[in-house]
Image: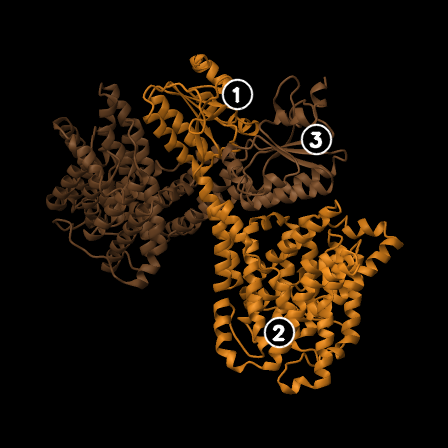
Chain colours: A brown, B orange
């Protein structure tokens, strides 16, 4: 248990000074202001009462400060995980019910336990199996799904569905019931927030503000939108004209809660909890790594699993729901100058104060304003460039993005992720199962060998030089056998086959058997098999077997050496 | 549809002459004699009436002769596929019932249809995902399972179970009920057959017979065992003392039958049919390839799928059950001198004659004798050497064998195969997700670079040379980021990082993003990233992106060139 004796907090805690304190306090104030509307909004997105978002933003920040290795990561509710929470629990209970909240708490507990376990078992590498294109497709599709799910709140109607098509068709049917006041508030708030995001920062900079400050002011846009629409609603009693408001938000500290100890429920939630854990971990680690690199710091993925696990467990015991390190808030924390995780602790204190004293002020807050903040936040995640980019670069990656995107939109977040990972693994295996094997020849006047199809090179009818551009393993060893067989059949004068092994990083037991079979068949036809440029680790392995002593030919250090010895006449060719 | 215009039969049919005819006829007679007891035995192993084994050895041979690309492959019932058939149908119907036979016919039809489809779609490469160690573990475990399943017949008791533990514990309980006469016949027959296999061939060769003839005579051992025990049973009426005999076997041509058109049944049988198809295909192709290579011939895996598909479909319409190319009979066919698939057609005629005229002679044939032929045949498949071999060579391969062996024995053939493939794929992915990345230095006085940990080489504190021994893809690109970050953190004077890419056969979109991220982070620390020895196809791909123009450093043709230009002081080091 390497992480126990050396908690990250001991690292930065030792040298904590006044300058750190000031920086952290300033950052905490800014993040707290940004976090309040976000927490409320993501709780609503998850189908939970708004105060649950505040609860989920307190204890996890403390726990992350103790166990986390990123200095600036801000943990709490995030958009994609909230959507996944809604999808998971939506099948088990009615949104807004007590059971629904209890299930969300249980989900946080399970996800926390899984993350902790993965951390202790050092399984952080598993997240690497989510490729960038799959993550990108998944995040874009989730962004669209989330935006679509918020349209009903912006229009003041009811709509159902956990996939894009159901949601949109349900919304289209509801158009006649649109509440025009709600729609107006929603559209104006959305437009304002988009302008804040795109237009306010340049404006402030033209007015002489520096870039960092302008950026931070722009991030407080949602607070302004909330303040203005809340005041207007209170002044004109818009709630009586059908505008839905947040209403009573209970004042007080986060409650002490317990997960449900119900095995049947656990079984139902196991897969969603695992997917939430993995997605949360990947999102968090990407943000953490990006920000750490900017200050030449490092984060420790396995320790991050422990930290996120502890954070989610703490969310479960304090009335919260699944959390992770969020992109937007971490960037704000970083830009605002946070130095250590103490900034997170101060933020948690700020949120606690808000849930103790601020909640009455939220009574008249229109839900449409919160929906607008969500729509603007998630649409920035939607990026279809990845489709164009991967199409140009690699059709396999493109297929993985497209499969993830379409499945997420049409069949939901969980299946989308599973299909994405599945497709990318299958395509990778397919690619490696068809190795590129080039016949190479000597570049005249050099000791280098190049593909006979791409270059003018010298060869001999008595010797076949094959360069295998892939590690040899069970899925491609038969392809090698086939290619050697084909080549032999088309070279009647052949006496030597030399495999250039410079790109072979591994030879597994199946491939070893294939090499033995190739050697045996070549021997039956009085042809010798040689190897050249075998790597150190591969050679070490082969030395443990009879292969080298049984081999009809030799192992040469360089391919040129093999040619020199076997068919020196090539060297004389002009 | 490449296979339609050029049927393999047209190939060899054109040049068919008298010499081929004689050779094929001789081989056919020998194979027929060997095949009769084998067909009966494997039908019983599959839980079917013995004559079904004969039916399954007629039509498939005709169809394979038309569509197959191997000149000598002998198609029919084989041990492992018969066991898998019993396991698949055993869950749906009672062995010996009419429904059981109907389901076996349906299974043959489905397996045939799947093979045909895979052939048309050119999916032959899928079989490559069954690694040699997995196949080996699977075959050994199946051999043990089959031998255990025959013990009940040898002991004259009833026993149940589709896994080794159930079977053996059931047998132990039955020991008191052992029929001593049955046991005696079984044990003597088994001992005789083992002696024929091990001792007869050397004896015949000492008596002056040549090796090939001695081998073929030894293969007729089962026929002798059957003749003798049948005669003894008839003479002494052993059936009245509890010895189970084959009894009435209907005389006549294979019947015309139809598969069950029952969607619910098809659903139940889909997975077993797929597994039977894949296992049958792999067994058949391995045999076919081994024998074809001996005569410098080739087989075409996708066309083999079509041929085996047609063979299984024909089995379904003529009262048979799933078939494939068998090892023992194909080797006998080859050794007996078969030249073309016409030998198969003649064998089919021989089996037809047997089912027309010979079946009354089988009435007194003891089932224990058939069980003995199965036990002796399958125990030769059991080979635990693979455990020792893979343990020494590669722990990953060893784990895959062990997982396959144990799962097959304890949880049955189907799960065994699925777990084996799963474990080997996971281990392969795990291995490639942790690439070997070596820091390399210049070997003094040469242009070669070697691992700094293994060799005495020259390096510079300003330049880090990393050789990546794996293609870069999503599962390992983060590991590269980590290693570069670590290396940079421990080299404070660093100005250049050069990645030697000679073993990188592919860079997918995720890895490209990682390289971009590495470049960006290095640039933030005023370090340049360079590449060297990038392969042609990888370079072609990179040229489609902005990566090369955005790169802080250069791409060098050789690593030595990079060192010459960036840190020429290394070359002066003595």
Instruction: Tell me whether marks 1 and 2 sit on the same chain.
Output: yes
Q: Write the residue at 69% across / 86% down.
A: B237
The alpha-carbon separation of the residues under discs 1 and 2 comes to 70 Å
The alpha-carbon separation of the residues under discs 2 and 3 comes to 56 Å
B398 vs A17, left or right, is: right
Instruction: Tell me whether marks 2 and 3 sit on the same chain.
Output: no
Disc 2 + disc 3, Cβ < 8 Å: no
Determine which of the numbered discs, if any, sits on residue A463 in the image.
Answer: 3
As displayed, is residue A535 above or below residue A268? above
User: Does the rendering let one see residue A91?
Assistant: no
Mark 1, Cα crowd under 10 Å, few <14 / some 14-19 / many 20+, is some
Which residue is nearer to you in this view: B532 or B540? Answer: B532
Question: Where is residue B282, by image quadrant?
Answer: bottom right
Mark 3, Cα crowd under 10 Å, few <14 / some 14-19 / many 20+, is many
Q: Nearer the viewer, mark 1 or mark 2?
A: 2
**Mark 1 = which residue?**
B558
Task: Chain letter for mark 1, please.
Answer: B
**Residue B146 appears at what percent x and percent y?**
58, 67
**Residue A343 appears at what percent x and percent y?**
18, 35
**Residue A486 appears at what percent x and percent y?**
70, 39
The alpha-carbon separation of the residues under discs 1 and 3 comes to 26 Å
Determine which of the numbered discs, if any, sits on residue B187 in the image.
Answer: 2
Pointer 1 or 2: first along the chain: 2
Q: Write the residue at 53% across / 29% down.
A: B538
Which residue is nearer to you in this view: B335 or B512? Answer: B335
As displayed, is residue A108 above or below residue A337? below
Q: Secondary structure at mark 2?
A: helix
A180 vs B252, left or right, is: left
Q: Secondary structure at mark 1?
A: loop
B350 vs A336, left or right, is: right
As displayed, is residue A74 above or below residue B206? above
């Amino acid at each position: 248990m390497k992480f126990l004796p050396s908690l990250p907090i001991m690292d930065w805690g030792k040298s904590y000074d006044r300058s750190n304190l000031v920086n952290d306090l300033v950052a905490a104030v800014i993040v707290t202001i940004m976090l309040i509307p976000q927490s409320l909004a993501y709780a609503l997105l998850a189908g939970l009462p708004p105060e649950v978002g505040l609860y989920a933003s307190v204890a996890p920040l403390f726990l992350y400060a103790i166990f986390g290795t990123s200095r600036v990561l801000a943990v709490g509710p995030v958009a994609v995980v909230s959507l996944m929470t809604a999808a998971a629990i939506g099948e088990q209970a009615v949104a807004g019910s007590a059971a629904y909240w209890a299930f969300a708490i249980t989900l946080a507990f399970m996800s926390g336990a899984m993350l902790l376990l993965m951390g202790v078992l050092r399984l952080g590498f598993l997240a690497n199996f989510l490729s960038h294109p799959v993550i990108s497709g998944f995040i874009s599709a989730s962004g669209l799904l989330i935006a679509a799910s918020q349209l009903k709140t912006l229009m003041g109607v009811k709509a159902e569905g956990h996939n894009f098509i159901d949601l949109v068709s349900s919304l289209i049917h509801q158009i006649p019931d649109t509440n025009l006041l709600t729609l107006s508030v929603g559209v104006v708030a959305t437009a304002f927030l988009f302008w804040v995001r795109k237009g306010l920062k340049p404006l402030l900079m033209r007015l002489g503000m520096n870039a960092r400050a302008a950026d931070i002011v722009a991030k407080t846009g949602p607070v302004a939108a909330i303040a203005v629409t809340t005041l207007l609603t209170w002044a004109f009693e818009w709630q009586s004209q059908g505008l839905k408001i947040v209403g009573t938000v209970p004042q007080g500290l986060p409650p002490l809660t317990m997960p449900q100890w119900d095995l049947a429920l656990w079984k139902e939630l196991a897969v969603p909890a695992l997917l939430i854990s993995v997605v949360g971990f990947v999102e968090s680690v990407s943000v953490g790594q990006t920000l750490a690199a900017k200050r030449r710091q490092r984060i420790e993925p396995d320790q991050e699993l422990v930290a996120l696990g502890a954070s989610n467990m703490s969310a479960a015991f304090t009335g919260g729901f699944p959390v992770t390190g969020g992109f937007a808030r971490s960037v704000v924390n970083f830009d605002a100058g946070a130095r250590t995780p103490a900034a997170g602790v101060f933020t948690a204190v700020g949120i606690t104060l808000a849930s103790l004293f601020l909640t009455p002020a939220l009574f008249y807050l229109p839900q449409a304003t919160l929906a607008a903040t969500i729509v603007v936040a998630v649409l920035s995640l939607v990026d279809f460039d990845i489709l164009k980019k991967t199409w140009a670069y690699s059709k396999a990656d493109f297929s993985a993005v497209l499969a993830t995107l379409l499945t997420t939109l049409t069949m939901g977040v969980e299946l989308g992720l599973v299909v994405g990972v599945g497709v990318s693994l299958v395509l990778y295996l397919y690619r490696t199962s068809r190795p590129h094997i080039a016949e190479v020849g000597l570049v005249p006047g050099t000791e280098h060998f190049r593909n006979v199809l791409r270059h003018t090179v010298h060869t001999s009818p008595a010797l076949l030089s094959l360069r295998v551009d892939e590690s040899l393993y069970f899925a491609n060893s038969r392809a090698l056998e086939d290619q050697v067989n084909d080549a032999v059949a088309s070279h009647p004068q052949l006496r030597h086959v030399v495999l250039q092994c410079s790109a072979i990083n591994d030879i597994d037991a199946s491939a070893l058997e294939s090499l033995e079979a190739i050697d045996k068949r070549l021997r039956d036809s009085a042809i010798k098999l040689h190897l050249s440029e075998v790597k150190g680790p591969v050679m070490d392995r082969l030395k443990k077997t009879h292969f080298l002593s049984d081999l009809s030919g030799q192992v040469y250090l360089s391919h040129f050496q093999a040619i020199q010895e076997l068919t020196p006449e090539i060297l004389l060719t002009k």
